[in-house]
Amino acid sequence: KLRGIMQEYIQINYEDGLFYTKAEFYYYGNMPESRQRVTQEMIDRISEIVPPSQKSSKQIDANLLEDRPYVNLAYVLQERIEEAVLAFVGYYLRKDIRTKGIINLCLAGGIELNVLVNGKIIDAGLVDAKHLFVPPVPSDQGTAIGAAMVLLRDIYCLNPSFKMEHAAYGPKYSEEEIRGVLDSFGFKEGRDFVRLGTEEEIAKETARLIIDNRVVAWFQGSSEIGDRKSVV
């Protein structure tokens, strides 16, 4: 039943690789406090199968029988997203005469933060892992970079192409600046923090802390652009 709803929500045309969302299911108004993105009609239909939960997504435990309906809901939505992206990418790499046979693939958009989807593209043999590139800022935040590159080309007549070898384009801070912040919070060397000289010392101390089940926050070099999310 959940698969049926998701197939109705995300409709895939395998002939042209395009997919559509059912307008009656998508919420177009001002975002409420609940950050509701679908209409009440869709919520009501899903609620007939999966009762509303008072838990947050982080509190859902796949091993609890009572939480299985929510796990199933997440599973079928993920499954349908994978099917839509695979149909889209597969069409352009295997059917469209303009792009058929291309081996290098760059994907952007917030959906590309979904590591499982990217893995399915590789597993399906559509592209080799070493030929798939996802920018470090594939979501809406990355439009600022795209806008800057368009200006370089259209206004300043410069070539915006470059080889991206890292994502550390943000500010960096000197040891004096870092020490000033630590001092401002009253942190004491030897009690609240230690100074380590070499990369080998840093690696050994970090490994020791991890072995002791400690959490390590590593601050080094320039800030990185992009989302920092993990998928378990």
Image: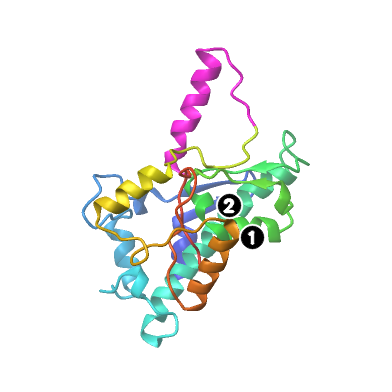
Q: Which mark is residue 174?
A: none
- Which of 137/28 is in front? 137
Horizontal side of 61 relative to 197 (left or right) equals left
Q: Can you give x and y, in whole percent of width and height, for residue 141 in the image?
A: 42, 40
Is the residue under label 1 in contact with that under label 2 (CB below 8 Å)?
Answer: yes
Q: Can you give x and y, in whole percent of width and height, for residue 224 in the image?
A: 48, 45
The N terminus lies in which quarter of the figure? bottom left
Residue at image coords 38%, 43%: 176
The residue pinned by badge 2 equals 85
Q: Quadrant of residue 190?
A: bottom left
Query: For the residue carrying disc 1, how many other residues have a C-alpha within 10 Å: few (<14), some (14-19), or many (20+)?
Result: some
Q: Relative to residue 211, is residue 227 depicted above or below?
A: above
Mark earlier in primary sequence (2, 1): 2
The residue pinned by badge 1 equals 120
Q: Which residues are magenta?
A: 139-162
Residue at image coords 35%, 69%: 57
Horizontal side of 221 relative to 57 (left or right) equals right
Residue at image coords 28%, 52%: 183
Query: Magenta stretch containing residue 80, yes or no?
Result: no
Q: Can you give x and y, in whole percent of width and height, for residue 117 in the image?
A: 58, 58
Most distant residue in the bottom direction? 65
Is residue 16 something one can see in this rendering?
A: yes
Q: Can you give x and y, in whole percent of width and height, for residue 148 in the image?
A: 48, 25
Q: Relative to residue 152, is residue 2 depicted above or below?
A: below
Residue at image coords 53%, 15%: 154
Q: Quadrant of residue 158?
A: top right
Is residue 126 something one can see in this rendering?
A: no
Describe the element under mark 2 as helix, strand or loop. Answer: helix
Query: For the residue carrying disc 2, how many other residues have a C-alpha within 10 Å: few (<14), some (14-19), or many (20+)?
Result: many
- Which of 78/141 is in front? 141
